[in-house]
Each structure stands twice: as C-alpha cells, then as structure tokens.
Amino acid sequence: MAYETILYTLDEGILTITLNRPDVLNACNRQMTDEIQDALKKAERDPNVRCIVLTGAGRAFSSGEDLKARQAAGTVGFESTLKERYNPIVLKMRNIEKPVIGAINGVAAGAGLSLALACDIRIASDKASFIEVFVRIGLVPDAGSSYFLPRLVGLAKAYEMCFTGDAVNAEEAYRIGLVNRVVPAEELETATREFALKLAKGPTRAIGLMKRTINRGLNLDLEQLLEYEVHSQQTAGQTEDHKEGLAAFLEKRTPDYQGR
C-alpha cells in the first residue's frame, strides 16, 4: 500500500509512523485508519523494526475522528467505524510484541487520545494537551479510552476527564501518570529518538514477552500470573538474545542484541 496520510520511516531499527494531515490537525479519516492498520501489520512482520514511534505532523498529535469527512460520507454507523477502523489499530498496538512509543507533539483529543493511550510509553512535548472530547458532542469515550485511562490515572481522574471534556496540559498529564515524561517542544524528536534507540538496541523478543505478560497480568489473579510468568521466562530463556545477554554479562561487555 502506498501511504498518503501517514509517513513510514525506518532508521536504525526505529519505525516512525507520522500522522500526516496537519491541515486538519491529523484528524483521522477512513484512509488514514486503513493506512495505520497496514503500517502496523507491516511493522509486525518486519524483523528490522525493533521499536515503533507514533507521532503527528505539525502542531497536533491527532484531533480524533474527522467529523467533517464523517458527515460528508452520510450515515455511517459507529459500530462499523469502531470495529473496522479503530479497534483493530488499538488491538494491534497492544498485541504487537515490539515497544510502541507515543511522541505526543500537540493536542491529542477524542480518538486521537485513545491512540496515544494505546501506546506503551508516552513522551510529551510541553505544548501537548489531552482531551476526552466525546462529552462535548454527547458521545462516550471509545477506541480503548475507557480501558486505558482509569488504569493510567485512576478512576476519579478518569471520570473527571470524561465527564467534563476539560483539557489536561502536559505538566498535569505527567503529574497524574498519563505520560512518562515531558520535554520542551523543540527537544521532543531528539528525546524520543534517544529513548527509542535504547529500546531498539535491546532484547526485542524479551521486551515483547514482557509486554505480553504485563498485558495479560491486567486480567489475571496472582496465581494465574505467576504461572504465566513461568511460560514467558521459559520462552525468553531459549532466545538468542538471552544467550548474548548472558555471555556479555560474564564477559563484562555491552551486549549486541539482534532481536532474535
């Protein structure tokens, strides 16, 4: 697929997917969500992709669903929009066994916030803002917001954000645990790349298994999770990266992980 609404850039194991409709604050139309789905499937299959960065072009991360495009398309059910367009993206972001970093360069609102929440780690520009905008048009948070938000910020703060639709700035987002770190806007690209490169040079299979196990643990009791950790550790122990990591430790050198 030739991409027109996103940019797909792979360098040193880091795949950067840039939402690229800056004239509409990277609002998501059908073409964009189709292209994001395709890009994530491609990234999952490509062993050269060791870390994924999701960001936006211009002054926004994403303002959410393109409501003008939706109106122009006529009657389109919310069920098909979510099941065919957004939910597959969120599930792929969570299930892909490679780290996904959100570089939140500006406003993340509505479904755009949901995409940010679905990332494993979020690095925000000091100009970023986060808005559960659905209440402003009489809708409910979707595309995973109802799942991720209370787990990140707690129940009371999630209720507040959803019920009011008030914007949360970058500083507040960091304070409540919505983002991992905040950097000056002009340093966002550099800071994100440094962090992504650290992950891309890591033991990709082990990181993928960590992600899978932590995600699974959100819905298991302790005894079940302990058992699942056994399975994950057995799998990690058979990887080439574990062998390299152990050898590097014993030889007192920096490991050279290959993601296998």
Image: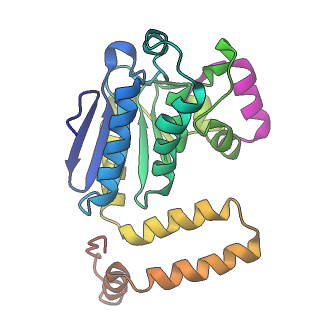
The residue lying at 31 percent from left, 70 percent from top is 259
Q: How is the image coloured?
A: rainbow
Q: Is residue 116 visible?
A: no
Residue drawn at (31%, 44%) of the image: 39
Name the residue: 29% across, 43% down.
Answer: 16
Of the pair 184 and 142, the residue shown nearer to us: 142
Quadrant into which the N terminus falls: top left
Asked if residue 156 is among those painted magenta in the image, a careful observer would answer yes
Relative vertical location of residue 233 with respect to residue 97 in this rendering, above or below? below
The mark total stands at 0
Determine whether 143 is above or below 252 in the image.
above
| Start-end of magenta stretch | 152-170
Q: In the rendered image of this protein, does residue 250 appear above or below residue 96?
A: below
Quarter occupied by residue 56: top left
Q: Nearer the viewer, residue 111 or 15?
A: 111
Quadrant of the image occupied by residue 254: bottom left
Task: Look at the image and tell me in which quarter the C terminus lies.
Answer: bottom left
Q: Is residue 44 visible?
A: yes
In the image, 57: left or right of 138?
left
Q: Measuring from the top left, give residue 30's x and y in whole percent.
A: 40, 26
What residue is drawn where x is 38% and y is 42%? 37
